[in-house]
Image: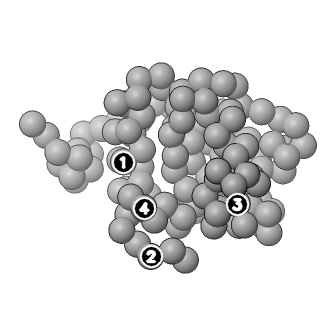
Amino acid sequence: MITLEELVNNRLLSLPKVDSVKSVSNLRGGDRFKSGGGVYTFYNQYHEPLYVGISCNVGKRVLEHLGSSKGNTDLVNYTKSKDGVYVSVFYEENKAYQEIYESYLISTLNPRFNVMKTGRDRI
């Protein structure tokens, strides 16, 4: 059995192409991702990864990160105070694949606000 560490170290995992990218300001203005399972990544204006997540309803989950108590608190606060934040999404209905892609992206991108799966302390 191959481990996630082997996948990462040997670059054996290829990610699906991004299906959509939207700015947080456009999402706040009414633009929406479609419903469906997938993986999403928040980036700042410098293309630095802020947060990676998965959901069976990406459209709804991304909006929760923009101001709901269900969102990552640090990410919610960051998106309220900063311009130039973007979200990319690729759709994947298979939950096992979502988990693999999320773990892979978190381990390779080291997003600022993913603390539970990285072992880092909160910023």
Measure the alpha-carbon separation of dots 3 and 4: 16 Å
Label whose residue precedes the other's in the sequence (1 or 4): 1
Label whose residue precedes the other's in the sequence (3 or 4): 3
Res 103 label: 1
Other-residue count near label 2 (Cα within 10 Å), few / some / many at <14 / 14–19 / ≥20 = few
Indicate the amino acid at tag 4.
Answer: Met
Element carrying mark 3: helix
Indicate the amino acid at tag 2.
Answer: Asp
Element carrying mark 1: helix
Measure the alpha-carbon separation of dots 1 and 2: 18 Å
Q: Residue at x 83, y 35 (%)?
A: 31
Element carrying mark 2: loop
Other-residue count near label 1 (Cα within 10 Å), few / some / many at <14 / 14–19 / ≥20 = many
Indicate the amino acid at tag 3.
Answer: Val
Percent coordinates x, y for residue 6 in the rendering:
17, 48
Q: Residue at x 71, y 67 (%)?
A: 78
| In the image, farthest residue toward the left | 1
Circle 4 residue: 116
Label whose residue precedes the other's in the sequence (4 or 2): 4
